[in-house]
Image (spheres, coloured by chain):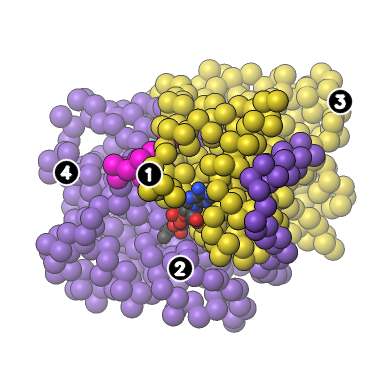
Chain colours: A yellow, B purple
Amino acid sequence: MEKILLLGFADQASSKLLAEGATVAANLAASLGCSWEVALIGEKVQEAANTLGGSGAAKFYGVEGEDFAFARYSSDLPAAEALLKESQATVILVPGSSRANRVLSALAMRLGGRADTHITSVTAKEGKVLANRWFYRQRMEACFSRPQRPWVMGLEPGNVVPQAFSASSVQVQMLSVALPDAAKRTKVLGLKYPAGTAQTIRPDAKLLFVAGAGWTKKQADGQIHAGEAEKAILDFLGKAQASLGSTKSLVDQSGEGNAVLSFMTHLNQVGQTGSTPRHSKGLATCCHGEEPHVVGWRFVTERRAVNMDANCGWARGKTDVLYVADAFEVMKKVNEILSA
Amino acid sequence: MANAYQIIVCGSLVPDPLQTLEPISTPGGPALKNELMLPAALDPWAGHALFEAANLAKQIPGSQVWLVSLGPKAKLQQLMMSVAQKAAFSFVPVEGNAGGFMSSVDCASALVKAIQGIAGLDMGRVLLFGGWESASRGAGSTLQLVGDALGIHDQFMGVDEIKVLEDGSFTVLERVEGACHQESLCAGAPAVLGWATGNLPEPTNNPQVGMVNMRSIMPALQKAVKAEVGLDGVEYVSVSLPKQLRDTRIVKDMPADEIAREIVEWIKK
Ligand SMILES: Cc1cc2nc3c(=O)[nH]c(=O)nc-3n(C[C@H](O)[C@H](O)[C@H](O)COP(=O)(O)OP(=O)(O)OC[C@H]3O[C@@H](n4cnc5c(N)ncnc54)[C@H](O)[C@@H]3O)c2cc1C
């Protein structure tokens, strides 16, 4: 008989991640006919625990304190270890985030189990737990099971619609975890926003707008129009509240002394060596649509592209619509319509 | 200035991302069609780790760089023809299956053994580098496991920058949610840094560095130990390619304002 534990961080309550995880946990527990529990780590965990008051979780555990306010391997790991030992769960579901993913593999290993990250779905078939994840950077999807327990699964965000659980005050069993000095060699100083990008990347936007290297290439008149490109793109992002993605070629140019878009950084890059964002729509402009870029579009549902080249990569079944046109002209008109 | 570092970079090969990949089933588990024939490249994020390592070693005199790679020997040798010209390092190859479906636990335990075999290793000076995720398994687990097994409890993932301070401590920028970085201050080595893109362009080929590297690479390859890297008990129920092709509507000769109107309508839908 499995026992399920949702392991989360208190700060995931505000981002829907915790509710997503609880949804997966509740569904899995229902299909296995077993109970599930919640364990939380953070500076304070009570409030986050209360948000799952009506979720059906049988029990709540917590590790809290100043030492656990920030994402740090050397404190998150012992906290998670203590929680798993206390609950004795066999299947641990963890809403995936940079904080969680930093410790999951070592966590499972320390307890004699195994971890798998970026899990897109968890199901049960004839009492057996099955997980799905992508391999080779979103090139192929596998469904698998594994014998080791505890089995720690990092859940990829955005794969389930989170249930709206009612909140209520719950009893949390607090565990005390004392950190040795050796676990405090790292001090988290805070968050740093690369100049300009904070406003251009909007993970929750409906629309992803991708700019490719074409924006900074010589155009029909033999000239580069980087300034115009910047204006058209920023204008559009503001008006459409879209999130800005980039190709590798465009962000790499900044290192090579070429014309650049001042607000682009590697954080904008989508693709094999960039991100795989989730948006319901995506519009690619001046981007060739090569495979290492397009694998980053795996979770972009509706796609359109504007490219001068009718034979670009997008034409080969990678977008729903390809407009063979000059993106400078098209985006100028789009911006005009949006401001009208 | 800080003590000289021993920078160990874990990184291996992956199929060239421009190749079409197709899964097949073999007695040893899922694999790629023609896996051994596919042109291979240095795993991109591990590559950034190597370039950052070489750059850091240059700044701090006396530092050394090792590249520890697990893969099929013949392919590692091919890979070295290009990688050896990019940065100065000592090569520590391990012969084993580097496929994406293979276990990161098996892989990590082979890497740990190889690292422990490096002569003159001083854990107080070790920075364990690598890609934060591979382009094959993409799990972000190998480096974490290697670090934990080596007793390194300061780990950073999705790293874009390290800055070493006068007293040997350093700051690290890690990618976190919301398109920003978390900045941390670490007291010093040992630490694990799983790199994202970093800040360096790919170094140009340097044939002299390549020649020096190759002198030690070939004997190292000959001595490469074999590691059993397998499925670790995982049972794959299915491995499939996504339905990739869309019916692309190619719109030619439509005036720009009409296209713009269509796009706006679609965005607002
Ligand atoms: C190991 C590795 C990893 C990689 N990872 C990634 C990754 O993560 N992400 C990524 O994006 N790439 C990645 N690549 C690179 C990828 O293969 C392509 O080289 C890259 O995506 C091309 O970028 P691009 O389309 O912007 O540029 P280009 O190929 O230069 O295309 C520019 C396009 O702009 C069009 N254009 C120019 N002017 C206009 C105009 N006025 N109107 C409309 N269209 C115009 C041109 O027709 C052309 O199609 C990777 C490659 C390797 C080898």
Mark sitting on residue A166 = 3
Q: Chain of mark 4?
A: B
- Per the model, the C-alpha gap separating discs 4 and 3 is 57 Å
Of residues B107 and B198, the one drawn nearer to the viewer in this rendering = B198
Q: Position of residue B174 (x, y in %)?
A: 44, 35
Q: Quarter of the image containing the C terminus of chain B?
A: top right
Front position among marks 2 and 4: 2
Q: Determine which residue is flagged by label 1.
A: A223
Residue found at x 84% / y 20%: A168
- Is the same chain shared between marks 1 and 2? no
Q: Amino acid at mark 1?
A: Gln
Q: Which residues are magenta?
A: A251-261
Q: Determine which residue is flagged by label 4.
A: B58
- Per the model, the C-alpha gap separating discs 2 and 3 is 48 Å
Q: Position of residue B11 (x, y in %)?
A: 37, 58
SS class, disc 1: loop
- Per the model, the C-alpha gap separating discs 4 and 1 is 40 Å
Q: Determine which residue is flagged by label 2.
A: B15
Q: Position of residue A264 (x, y in %)?
A: 45, 36
Q: Chain of mark 3?
A: A
